[in-house]
Image: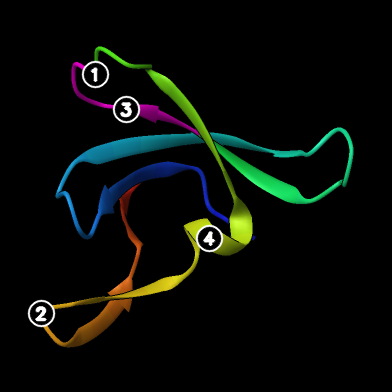
């Protein structure tokens, strides 16, 4: 279960607010819907498969969560 709230993207350092979860209309794959907390000319709202949102990435040789929960 992905908590609603503010997350930090570990690679970019940018903040996002998770506003909900959804199901992909064709596959029913769980998706995370989130909003950039900074000016982004491409899009303010984003969607990503929950499995990728919760994935672990390697940064400078360390394995860390792709998104780190900051606060509600």
* Residue 59 in picture, x, y percent from top left: 17, 75
- Return the residue at label 1: 40
* The residue stretch that appears in magenta: 34-40
- Work out how far the residue at label 4 is from the one at label 1, CA to CA, in angstroms: 21 Å
Kindly check if marks 3 and 1 are in contact, taking CB atoms under 8 A apart as contact: yes
Quarter of the rendering occupied by the N terminus: bottom right
User: Does the magenta segment cover residue 13?
Assistant: no
Kindly check if marks 2 and 3 are in contact, taking CB atoms under 8 A apart as contact: no
Of badges 2 and 3, nearer the viewer stands 2
Indicate left or right for 38 with 68 as reference. left
- Return the residue at label 4: 52
* Residue 43 in picture, x, y percent from top left: 38, 16
- Mark 1 Cα shell of 10 Å, populated few (<14), some (14-19), many (≥20): few
- Mark 2 Cα shell of 10 Å, populated few (<14), some (14-19), many (≥20): few
- Return the residue at label 3: 36
Mark 1 secondary-structure assignment: loop
* The disc label shown at residue 60, or none: 2
């Amino acid at each position: 279960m992905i908590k609603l709230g503010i997350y930090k993207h570990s690679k970019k350092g940018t903040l996002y607010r998770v506003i909900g979860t959804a199901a992909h209309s064709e596959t029913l794959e769980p998706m995370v819907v989130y909003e950039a907390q900074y000016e982004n000319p491409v899009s303010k709202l984003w969607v990503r498969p929950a499995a990728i949102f919760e994935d672990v990435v390697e940064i400078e040789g360390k394995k860390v969560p792709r998104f780190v929960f900051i606060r509600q």
